[in-house]
Amino acid sequence: MMARKSLFSRGPFLMGLTLLVFGGLAFALPAFLPPAQSPEAAAEIGRITGMIGGGLMGVGLVAMVFGLLRWMRQA
């Protein structure tokens, strides 16, 4: 019987964790940008970075769950 590997040595879990962090950074990006010229431009920047951040975080969560399930199924 093989010893169970660490959860953090599993590829999908670590990739998902990384995507989750980058998604959070994409959400925070507008705070570090200079002020927009108009409220419409600010709304557009927020919408775009929100979609990018949400997509990255969603894919990251799915990858983390997949990695966790693989780790739990392991002997």
Image (spheres, rainbow, N blue to C red):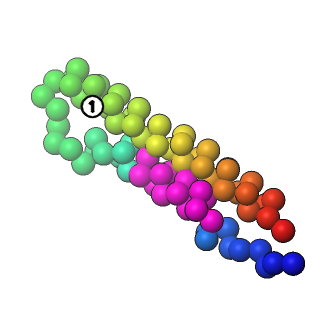
Tell me if residue 41 comes above or below residue 9 in the rendering: above
Reading the image, the residue beneath label 1 is 45
Compare residues 39 and 72 and report the one nearer the observer: 72
Q: Residue furthest top?
A: 40
Residue drawn 17% across and 37% down? 35
Quadrant including the N terminus = bottom right
**Magenta region's main secondary structure?**
helix
Residue drawn 54% across and 40% down? 58
Q: Quarter of the image holding residue 46?
A: top left
Residue drawn 41% across and 32% down? 51
**Type of amino acid at the residue the image marks with label 1:** Ile
Magenta range is 10-24
Compare residues 74 and 24 and report the one nearer the observer: 74
Magenta run includes residue 21: yes
Q: Quarter of the image holding residue 68?
A: bottom right
Q: Residue furthest front?
A: 1
**Side of 75 relative to 23 (left or right):** right
Quadrant including the C terminus = bottom right
Tell me if residue 43 comes above or below residue 32 in the rendering: above
